[in-house]
DNA sequence: GTCTATATTGTGATAGAC
DNA sequence: GTCTATCACAATATAGAC
């Protein structure tokens, strides 16, 4: 960790709040715990952010932006379809390894209040239509077999995200008998997921 | 709904608690809300179950048993590998459609307290080794290509579970532009998931 | 068994000294 | 800006009448 630069209180608080909220969720976290984590007094939280809800909102917005993959860049580049998949999986899994509790946090909080999504996606924007178009072009070009993009995209996302959401269960039913730790297991998936997809939809 | 038979208070409370806990989680639920849902007084909850935690535990244990797929039955039957996959996906998605919030609930609560798992799996037991052995036999028999079972099994589970965990997001980024409602979308997946797997690992 | 208080602790939030 | 003290209320839990 190289970020020991003296930061201002506001970002210190945000960092502590992020840590606590992401791990325990909104209803599972208390202002006291966040204050302790930040090494300051409870009232200071209210000084910088008016309420628990506002503090949470600040954390959630930034976390959500991180969660939605920057899929546009790589999907419009000139590389082959298989390389696009590999590149995406590699980049996204790397980010998730650095933020293993992010998926569970986002999914749970969105479930708690789905209305946030509409406002969220205005800022962030997952370019669905662009990806669908890209996939359809690959099909008509004869590079991949006819696959329904509206199922393929969730399949891809699920295979990346699921291990992080179900981490304790996976550890119990699989990894323990597989003698690998979690990070090594995810590293393996960087090859396994593209391989799985390759056999599933590639024509040549 | 045909279950209007007069039930005893205890199961009425359990039903109400299940509804509230599964939707809002342990920290997001209050005893008051559960009492309201059951149409009774707050103190009665404490009469039947000593504490919030005990009431939750009763709900969680039964929910967890439902969540862990009865994969042993179908995986040891004499049918072909592809039929096993299709049968499992069909059965499991049907159960999930009746309990759409179950996966998010279980996964979130396990994340909140992973220690429960050890005790849970003693009772329930997901027969990992049996499934792994079965897959390895299919490989050596030349029915499917050599695939790592420790990645294949999570892939299969993830494709079934993910839509339910990420339902609001999927609705926002996919289904709206796809003109299907959620149930119709899941019905489609009963064919799409086996199809995806078939192309991915079947040899013939 | 079921209800109406009531006790007791948690927690978000504010007031006010410095 | 930062702290201590305190308020107001919500939530779990219990006591006791019926």
Image (cartoon, coloured by chain):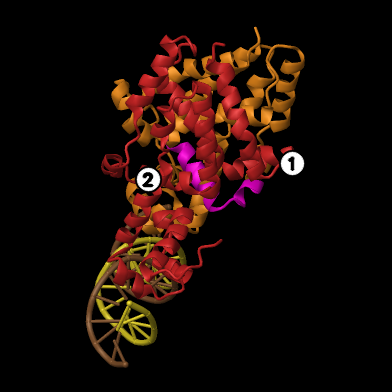
Chain colours: A red, B orange, C brown, D yellow
In magenta stretch: residue B112: yes
Q: Is residue A22 above or below residue A191?
A: below
- Whole-angstrom CA distance, mark 2 to mark 1, is 34 Å
Magenta stretch bounds: B101-119
* Image quadrant in which you'd find residue A141: top left
Mark 2 closeness class: few <14, some 14–19, many ≥20 residues within 10 Å = some
According to the image, label 1 marks what residue?
A179
Residue under the point 68% across and 14% down: B144
> Relative to the observer, which residue lies in front, A125 or B9?
A125
According to the image, label 2 marks what residue?
A65
Q: Please identify the quadrant where the N terminus of chain A is shown.
A: bottom right
Most prominent secondary structure in the magenta stretch? Answer: helix
Q: What mark, if any, has residue B40 been given in the picture?
A: none
Q: Please identify the quadrant where the C terminus of chain A is shown.
A: top right
| Image coordinates for residue B204, horizontal then vertical, percent | 65, 6
Q: Is residue A135 above or below residue B9?
A: above
């Amino acid at each position: 960790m190289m970020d020991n630069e003296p930061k201002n209180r506001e970002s210190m608080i945000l960092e502590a709040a992020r840590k606590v909220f992401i791990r325990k969720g909104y209803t599972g976290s208390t202002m006291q715990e966040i204050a302790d984590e930040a090494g300051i007094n409870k009232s200071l939280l209210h000084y910088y952010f008016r309420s628990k809800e506002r503090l949470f909102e600040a954390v959630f917005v930034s976390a959500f932006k991180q969660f939605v993959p920057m899929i546009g860049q790589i999907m419009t580049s000139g590389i082959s379809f298989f390389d696009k998949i590999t590149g995406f999986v590699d980049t996204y899994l790397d980010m998730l390894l650095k933020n293993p509790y992010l998926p569970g946090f986002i999914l749970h909080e969105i479930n708690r209040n789905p209305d946030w999504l509409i406002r969220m996606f205005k800022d962030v924007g997952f370019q669905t239509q662009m990806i669908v178009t890209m996939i359809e072009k690959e099909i008509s070009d004869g590079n991949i077999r006819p696959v329904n993009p509206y199922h393929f995209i969730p399949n891809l996302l699920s295979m990346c995200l699921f291990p992080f959401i179900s981490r304790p269960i996976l550890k119990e039913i699989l990894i323990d008998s597989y003698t690998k730790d979690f990070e090594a297991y995810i590293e393996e998936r960087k090859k396994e997921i593209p391989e799985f997809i390759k056999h599933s939809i590639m024509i040549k």
